[in-house]
């Protein structure tokens, strides 16, 4: 994946720089506050209300009903009668909720089940008549485009093949350079595959032939496959279970092909009910997993990716991305989410920028991927201040590792979490968080600890800005960390400040020096 360029390399510092001009008050951005979308799929119907006017989506409301609208469609050509009724009940509720929230018209899209069923148009009319919702039935190529845009919302620099599986269809879309390119659609959804006669061999042959046709349309040689859809997420959760993986966050969970094939084999030999119970997967979803694993095996065999990544973002987030102004699309999702969090949750919004300026000499020039993490940490350093002091360090860690932040790998989540833990606590030994730390090397843990202790010192060194009290200098050559105090700074440099400064120097394995 391409690395993000630094501001001076892009010539567009305002749009890239995390401390550039805020966009929160831009009318075109504020218009995204409380955007409601409904996705009427073959298996589930979901309503999401986004909020926050930030580049990274905040979920004000999120509810789904496993209606099973497309169950049996391949056999009967019609929508599932029970699914129709369950869907109507859900959509009436969603329309009423939108009215109560005063969010304006919901954006409603329907996919494979309604576009393929012979009674799809009749159900379409019934929905609009009984709920007042305006529903757009989209074709497979448009579904592929919107799903790919959802991935780009969370991964602006994503490059590879997006694969979105639903109950009755599977779409592929190539993403590169921030745009959606070649697209293809198929009927490889598990509901469709259930109707193929001839047993597992016949199903496998059908899948293989269909994927070969798809490969001709979107090309091969994609290093990454981005998985979108509930069946894929269920398989990824089972992969976590098999591996004993500690961080149960599906978004940006990354798998290698060999390990994923091992998981597929393991699933095939396991008791599905026991796996369902262990992972909390719904019965309706787990029923589709065996067929989805067959599709995934053939995808891996045909496209030979180097990595397979899970995206929790799909068509609904793609609809939000569709409405974003270009200026907002260009922003870093992680940094914009952290800026918004600081604005609404910290004691002194704007202090993160001052804190970063104060501690920056410790780190010197950083590669862009590390530079953004340091700035994200500074923005978040004070956002759990309301938590009881005994739990504040762990609350910091929990918030950043489990919150709905995107454009960040699991290892980066842990790194940021460790830094924020040390913002409030000197030692991490004996913590219940130990299992997560195995995702980082010792050098990475040391880097995060230094950042945390730098924030711990800088955040309490002065009330308005740490620069009012002094300036940090770090010489790697001489292995000295120097604090040059201003005249005002001598009053700020009390016993607690001295202790925290010495702790920072110890983490750097440097000699502390105070002058002024």
Image (spheres, rainbow, N blue to C red):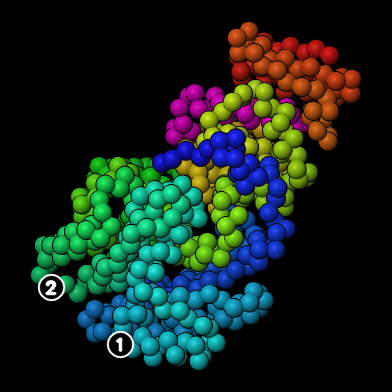
Q: Nearer the viewer, mark 1 or mark 2?
A: 1
Q: Is residue 186 left or right of residue 316?
A: left
Q: Is residue 310 left or right of residue 11?
A: left
Residue 48 position in % (x across, y down): 54, 68
Instruction: Write down the residue under mark 1.
Output: 118
Residue 422 position in % (x across, y down): 63, 31
- 494, above or below 3, in the image: above
Residue 493 lies within the magenta run: no
Mark toward the start of the polypeptide (1 vs 2): 1
Q: Residue at x 76, y 22 (%)?
A: 471
Assign a secondary structure to mark 2.
Answer: loop
Quadrant of image for the N terminus: top left
Instruction: Write down the residue under mark 2.
Output: 197
Q: In the image as oriented, which residue stretches furthest toward the top?
A: 478
Q: Residue at x 47, y 42 (%)?
A: 409
- 116, above or below 321, in the image: below
Residue 104 position in % (x across, y down): 63, 77
Q: Residue at x 59, y 81 (%)?
A: 96
293 or 211, which is in the foreground? 211
Assign a secondary structure to mark 1.
Answer: loop
Check disc 2: other Cα within 10 Å, few if <14, some if 14-19, many if 20+: few
Q: Main secondary structure of the magenta part?
A: helix
Q: In the image as oriented, which residue stretches furthest toward the front?
A: 11
The residues bearing labels 1 and 2 have C-alpha atoms spaced at a distance of: 22 Å
| Highlighted magenta segment, given as a residue range | 435-460
Q: Is residue 295 left or right of residue 391?
A: left
Total labels drawn: 2
The picture quadrant where one finds residue 468 is: top right
């Amino acid at each position: 994946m391409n690395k993000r360029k630094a501001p001076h390399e892009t010539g567009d510092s305002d749009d890239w720089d995390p401390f550039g001009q805020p966009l929160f008050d831009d009318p075109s951005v504020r218009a995204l506050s409380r955007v409601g979308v409904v996705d009427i799929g073959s298996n589930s119907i979901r309503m999401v209300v986004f909020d926050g006017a930030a580049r990274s989506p905040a979920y004000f409301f999120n509810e789904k009903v496993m209606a099973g609208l497309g169950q049996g469609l391949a056999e009967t050509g019609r929508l599932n009668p029970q699914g129709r009724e369950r869907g109507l009940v859900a959509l009436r509720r969603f329309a009423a909720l939108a009215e109560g929230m005063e969010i304006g018209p919901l954006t409603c899209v329907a996919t494979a089940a309604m576009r393929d069923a012979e009674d799809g148009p009749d159900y379409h009319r019934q929905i609009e008549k009984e709920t007042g919702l305006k529903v757009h039935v989209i074709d497979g190529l448009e579904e592929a485009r919107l799903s790919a845009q959802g991935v780009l919302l969370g991964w602006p620099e994503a490059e590879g093949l997006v694969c979105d599986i639903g109950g009755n269809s599977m779409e592929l879309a190539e993403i590169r350079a921030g745009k959606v390119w070649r697209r293809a659609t198929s009927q490889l959804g598990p509901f469709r595959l259930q109707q193929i006669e001839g047993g597992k061999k016949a199903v496998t042959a059908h899948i293989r032939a269909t994927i070969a046709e798809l490969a001709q349309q979107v090309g091969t040689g994609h290093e990454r496959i981005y998985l979108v859809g509930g069946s894929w997420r269920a398989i990824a959760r089972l992969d976590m279970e098999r591996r004993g993986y500690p961080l149960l966050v599906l978004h940006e969970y990354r798998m290698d092909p060999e390990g994923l094939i091992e998981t597929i084999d393991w699933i095939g030999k396991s008791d599905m009910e026991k796996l369902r119970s262990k992972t909390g997967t719904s019965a309706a979803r787990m029923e589709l997993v065996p067929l989805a694993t067959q599709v995934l095996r053939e995808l891996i065999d045909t496209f030979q990716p180097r990595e397979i990544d899970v995206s929790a973002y799909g068509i609904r987030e793609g609809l939000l991305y569709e409405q974003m102004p270009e200026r907002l699309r260009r922003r870093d999702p992680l940094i914009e989410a952290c800026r918004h969090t600081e604005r609404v949750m910290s004691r002194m919004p704007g202090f993160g920028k001052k804190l970063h300026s104060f501690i920056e000499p410790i780190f010197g020039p950083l590669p862009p991927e590390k530079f953004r993490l340091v700035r994200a940490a500074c923005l978040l350093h004070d956002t759990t201040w309301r938590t009881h002091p005994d739990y504040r360090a762990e609350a910091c860690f929990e918030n950043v590792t489990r919150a709905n932040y995107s454009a960040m790998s699991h290892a980066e989540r842990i790194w940021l979490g460790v830094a924020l833990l040390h913002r409030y606590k000197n030692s991490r030994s004996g913590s219940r968080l130990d299992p997560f730390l195995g995702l980082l090397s010792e050098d990475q843990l040391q880097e995060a600890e230094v950042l945390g202790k730098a924030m711990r010192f800088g955040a309490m060194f002065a009330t308005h800005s740490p620069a009012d009290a002094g300036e940090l200098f770090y010489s790697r050559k001489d292995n000295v960390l120097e604090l040059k105090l201003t005249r005002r700074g001598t009053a700020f440099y009390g016993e607690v400040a001295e202790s925290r400064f010495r702790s920072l120097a110890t983490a750097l394995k440097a000699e502390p020096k105070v002058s002024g």
